[in-house]
Image (cartoon, rainbow, N blue to C red):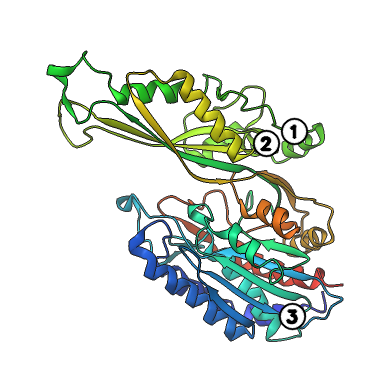
Amino acid sequence: MAQSTKALDYLHEHQQEYLAQLIEFIKIPSISTLPENTQDINHAADFLAVKLKSLGIEHVEVFPTARHPIVYGDYMHAGDNQPTVLIYGHYDVQPVDPLDLWHHEPFQPVREGDNLYGRGASDMKGQVWAIVSAIESIMHTDKFPLNLKFIIEGEEEIGSLHFEDFLKAHKDLLSASFALNADTGMIAPDMPTIVYGLRGMAYFELKVFGPSHDLHSGVYGGVVQNPAQVLADLISGMRDGDGVVQLPGFYDKVVPLTEQERTELARLHMDDAYYQEQTGAPVAWGEKGYTPVERVGGRPTLDICGLLSGFTGAGAKTVIPAWAMAKISTRLVPDQSPDDVHKQLIEYLQKHAPNTVTWTLEKLSGGSPSISDINTPETKALVAALEAVWGTKPTYKREGGSVPVVSSMQRILGIDSVLTGFGLPDDNIHSPNEKLNLPTWFKGVEALVHFFYNASK
């Protein structure tokens, strides 16, 4: 505690400066999926590189990839006997659609009460800047107690397309004791959280083709198969009324939740009422035999994320569409793999798609699930840091979302990740009116200061 006092004092004196810097970061519309935002992506990478250099981070470089760059830097002055922490983050954000549902301009951050609104405020520019702010507070008041490396990418929101290639090509450069990843969140403002499990993902685009062009539904209705109807039948059969996925072999490699895990998850009190409040859904729903928090963290799912076919404008237009498309997201748990699910989905389509249409299936992105050891020294260091700030022990949670880079680092670099973050369930990440709760965020920066000291030997 005494070690961190000067850094914490500096943090408290400069927190409004840190907030102002975060606002400038959020203003950059670094949407990774849209080609028209490529210049903004590069601007965000350069913005980070300049900031790291201003802290005294060395060997800062913006590495190009086949699409969006990765920002690297290091500070290796703590000594060989101290751990090296690899700081992971991403500077890209999701698209803002539908724009008309935003209360403010997405890239003109607005503070209302305790909340800062803007795209990327929570996911994940706010989390990256929490780490940067904690490091700056220490660097200005003390010798940094750990060795530092940074890897901050610009493709996380599109599946980290070139991240694994970068890890493989730079294994020696990225050698570290463990990774710190703040791309998760908290259950509630008074419940600091450590995530030890992450679901993986396999995301697909399915297209069904019928006639060579749109047809008059009166002249040709009943003569040719309607690809929109076939698509609806196919996707409705991919899971039953209880939410059980019907792809062949989908559950064969699923590792069941242990009784200890189910007991720990039950302590989170994330029941039907909790999820109804968070989502606005009239009734909670899901796979029978599991509680909502068990379904979210420990069970795989299949969801339709988008549909497109035929005429979708106002009024009527009587056509049989030439094609129909669905975006399909599967969330995976240990020991499922995206490649296995790809094969299972193909097998399902080969069995159930009629010969009156043709179809294509494209795998757009994928990432493996992961489980991290909660008994490592660095995780214990984070537990103590969170408890020092919040006055309560953190909860352990298996997260429903996917952070594929965690399993990539395990496989390629041989390191586990400490997973935390200071976003809240109602932050509207990936949705209109994304926000960051500032009192929680400031506490998070304090906790990170404690963590860096706690993790030193």
| In the image: residue 4, left or right of residue 236 | right
Q: Name the spot of residue 178 as percent of width and height, x first.
A: 75, 63
Q: Are marks 2 and 1 in contact (CB under 8 Å)?
A: yes
Q: Give the residue drawn at x 67%, y 82%.
A: 10
Q: How many marks on residues?
A: 3
| Circle 1 residues within 10 Å: few <14, some 14–19, many ≥20 | few
| Circle 2 residues within 10 Å: few <14, some 14–19, many ≥20 | many
**Disc 1 target residue:** 257
| In the image: residue 381, left or right of residue 158 | right
Q: Which mark is residue 76?
A: 3
Q: Quadrant of residue 414?
A: bottom right
- Residue 141 seen in the figure: yes
Q: Name the spot of residue 247 as percent of width and height, x first.
A: 55, 25
Amino acid type for the residue under numbered disc 1 = Leu
Q: Quadrant of residue 324?
A: top left
Question: SS at mark 2?
Answer: helix
Using the image as rendered, state which of residue 147 and residue 136 is in the foreground.
147
Question: SS at mark 3?
Answer: loop
For the residues carrying marks 1 and 3, which lies nearer the camera in this image? 3
Q: Give the residue drawn at x 38%, y 66%.
A: 38
Q: Name the spot of residue 26 as percent of width and height, x first.
A: 45, 68
Of the two numbered discs 2 and 3 on the same chain, state the one appearing first in sequence. Answer: 3
Q: Which mark is residue 17?
A: none
Question: SS at mark 1?
Answer: loop
Q: CA distance from mark 1 to mark 3?
A: 40 Å
Q: Name the spot of residue 233 as percent of width and height, x first.
A: 39, 20
Quarter of the image for the N terminus: give it. bottom right
